[in-house]
Structures are given as structure tokens and as C-alpha cells.
Image (cartoon, rainbow, N blue to C red):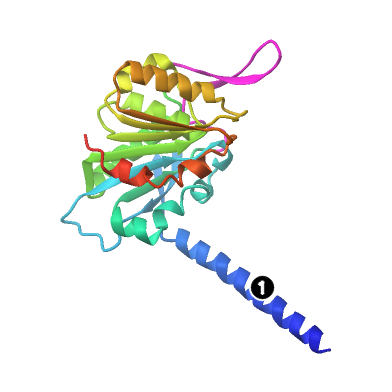
Amino acid sequence: MLNEIKMKRFFVAFIILVTTGIAVKAQDFSQYQKRWLVQGADTMPYRILLPQNLDASKTYPVVFFLHGRGERGSNNESQLKYAGQLFLKPEVRKNYAAIVVFPQCSSDGYWSNAWRTYDETKKEGFTFLADGEPTKDMRMLQQLVKYVLEAYPANKEQVYVGGLSMGGMGTFEIVRRNPNLFAAAFPIAGGANPATAASIKRVAWWIFHGAKDDVVYPSYSQAMFGALRKEGASIRFVLYPEANHNSWDAALAEPELLSWLFSKHR
């Protein structure tokens, strides 16, 4: 009987602990304000995190983070899944006061002009266009960037962009479409057409990929690294030898990532 009581108390305590943990996590993400950009018939959900004790007389760096294909939709939640916690860490909020924006791509949309292709063995890959009209979501994203930089106390010399997988591809593309805007970019498990390197060489780059990635091949990032280095860009590249497609776990845990990022100015 005594053991049964102890077990019941244990499970009650466990449930309370788990529930509290979930509540804390939800409360953390609630610090990101929910917003929607409306352009005609199109709407782009986004979450925005403002600096603690924001001083409207000052300007702040701005970080845009682009999620992957699995986080597309309209719930204005999923885009925070992998990187949302990074910018909520107390030491990050204290040391890197910034405006952080997480837009959400539509459920059937794509950030970049990247197309799935198949070789003669039916192996999947991607073809990256070097030009062409932006996708609907890229067009909306560019409108969102413009709006944020105008509506908030943004330091236009410190505008940054990063993303994972589809968002890594989008990172390369939005820099190409706005080559004089961003100070630094950090694509993770992404890719682009190497022919675009000359147009994006003025931005500081830190590229990440997993060597065992069988979804978005590491050769895409390797090709961009080689092309950018050839153009004389300021660039770093990390290829994680044991990582598959989830190389963002390691990349977002890099101890120098944010100090590197926020040290860059236009």
C-alpha cells in the first residue's frame, strides 16, 4: 500500500514537472509577437522578438531566420521549431540585443527558385536557377524585410539572414536579390547556383552542412563555398562529418556563431 502511494505521488510529480516544462516552453515562444503581413490577396505570418527594454531612441541589429520545408503552413508557430529557442536564451538576449524575425512560408510555397530533379537512377536532387522571377513567398519575404526595416528601430548596417534546408536555399537567394542589404548570412544545409557567387560576394558568409546529408546534398554547399572563395568573399565553411540533414543542430550550437554574426557590418 505504501509503495502504491509513493508511486502515485511520483507520477503526479512527474506530470506536474512535464506540464510545467511544456508551459514554460510555450511561454518562452510567446515572447515572439504574432504578426501577419498582408499584400493584396496574400498573407505571410511572422513572429518577431524585440529587444528587452527596447529604447526607441536607439537602433538594433535585425536577424531574419528562414525555416525549412517541414515548417511551412499558416499556423504562425512551426517556423520557431528549431531556432526559436536560440534567441530566447538569457545570455543571448543580454549580449545581443536585436530584432529577430521568423517568417512562415505558405504550405505549398518555397523560398527559392530550387526545383527537385531526378537522375537516370531516379535519385532525387535539386536544380538551382541563377535568375528568374521570385516565388510568391520570396516576393512576400522581401516586402516583409522592407517593412520591418522601416517600421522598427533597425540598424541598417547590421541586417542578417540565415536559414535551414529550404531556408538555407532561401538565404542564398534573398541575398542575391538584395546584394547591398545584408551584412552577413549563415545558410545551413542549403544550396544555390554557383554562377550567383559574384553577385553575393560582398556579404560575410558562414556555410554549414552535414557530410552525410542525403536530402540536400553537401556538394551544393561545397560548390557555393568554392565559388564564393574564388570571388574573394569573406567566408567560413563547416562540414560536419557525421551529420545528416539535421546539421542545424550542430550549427545553431556553434559557440562562435552569434559573436561572428553580430560583429559584421555593411
At 20% from the left and 59% from the top, the residue drawn is 55
At 62% from the left and 28% from the top, the residue drawn is 214
Tell me the residue that label 1 is attached to.
Answer: 15
**Highlighted magenta segment, given as a residue range:** 107-129
* Percent coordinates x, y for residue 56 in the rendering: 19, 57
Q: Is residue 229 left or right of residue 117?
A: left
Question: Observer-nearest residue: 222 or 37?
Answer: 222
Q: Dot 1: what SS? A: helix
**In the image, residue 225 lies in the stretch drawn in magenta:** no
Name the residue at the right extreme. Answer: 1
* Percent coordinates x, y for residue 231 in the rendering: 31, 17
Compared to residue 112, the image places residue 75 above or below, namely below
Q: Amino acid at mark 1?
A: Ile
At 27% from the left and 34% from the top, the residue drawn is 183
Q: Quadrant of residue 199?
A: top left
Q: Is residue 131 visible?
A: no
Compared to residue 98, the image places residue 24 above or below, namely below
* Percent coordinates x, y for residue 219 in the rendering: 52, 21
Q: Quadrant of residue 141?
A: top left
Q: Quadrant of the N terminus?
A: bottom right
Name the residue at the front extreme. Answer: 241
